[in-house]
Amino acid sequence: MDRLLSPAETEIVMLSLRVSLVAVAASLPIGIALAYLLSRGSFWGKSVLDGVVHLPLILPPVVTGYALLLLLGRHGPLGRLLDDIGIVLAFRWTGAAVAAAVMGLPLMVRPIRLSLDAIPPKLELAASTLGARPIWVFLTVTLPLMIPGILTGAVLSLGKSLGEFGATIMFVSNIPGETETLPLAIYASVQEPGGEAEALRLTIISLALSMAALIVSEYLSRRAQRRLTGAR
């Protein structure tokens, strides 16, 4: 990569990968919990929760980013609490990871929920009747059958995180070396005279990473379909 890109461009690519991987790792437990609630839960407000989870897909990304700034900025209700314990998200790379996680969460939750919906309830019921506690039923029966959906959701979220722009620039701005991910760097390059070559190189890298994520996602989706079909 050092032969193809300048040190500054390599730093941008590595920062993008770090932000995306942290976003996926941080949101995965939340995505699994939300998918389980939406698939297995029966409670008042389930439709509202489903709508909130998928809201980032409908709202303009800059609106989501502005909402994050209002909520998690230093003057926001949660931002002040985090600031008191030394955690600052606004205008930091960790904030870029939060924005990417929020934008990628709907794409993570959906395939995990579909995997859960496809699991025959009789398998979980059989484990329960044999005396297994609910937590063990989940860990030994449900979770292994969810793995293809979890992997697919994680890859889709990773791809979305790599391409996230609107919410990121609104929440953490475009600070070189701190929050300048691939999409932000491409946008900044085309605004500068003579920056077309750099923008093209970064665009090719971005396309390659996104295509790799889509190919892996498709492969995992097909494996999940075959596995769940064979489980019936």
Image: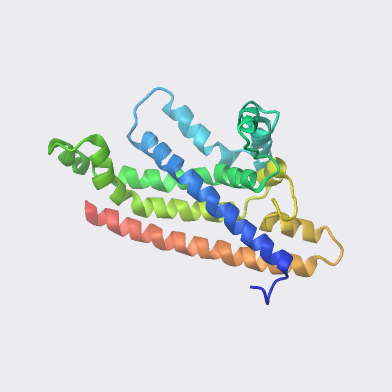
> 120 or 80: which is nearer to us?
80
Q: Is residue 107 visible?
A: no
Establish if 89 lies above or below 230: above
Q: Is residue 206 visible?
A: yes
Percent position (x, y) of residue 173?
Answer: 73, 45
Percent position (x, y) of residue 18?
Answer: 58, 56
> 183 or 22: which is nearer to us?
22
Residue at 12% x, 39% y is: 130
> 222 or 171: which is nearer to us?
171
Q: Residue furthest right?
A: 193
Establish if 39 lies above or below 177: above
Determine whether, in the image, residue 40 is placed left or right of residue 161. Answer: left
Determine whether, in the image, residue 150 is placed left or right of residue 1. Answer: left
- Report which quarter residue 89 is drawn in: top right
Percent position (x, y) of residue 71?
Answer: 64, 30
Percent position (x, y) of residue 209?
Answer: 57, 64
Q: Residue furthest left?
A: 130
Residue at 52% x, 65% y is: 212
Q: Residue furthest top?
A: 44
Q: Quadrant of the N terminus?
A: bottom right
> 5 or 116: which is nearer to us?
5
Q: Tell how many labels.
A: 0
Residue at 55% x, 56% y is: 159
Determine whether, in the image, residue 160 is placed left or right of residue 31. Answer: right
Picture colour scheme? rainbow
Q: Residue furthest front?
A: 85
- Report which quarter residue 114 is drawn in: top left
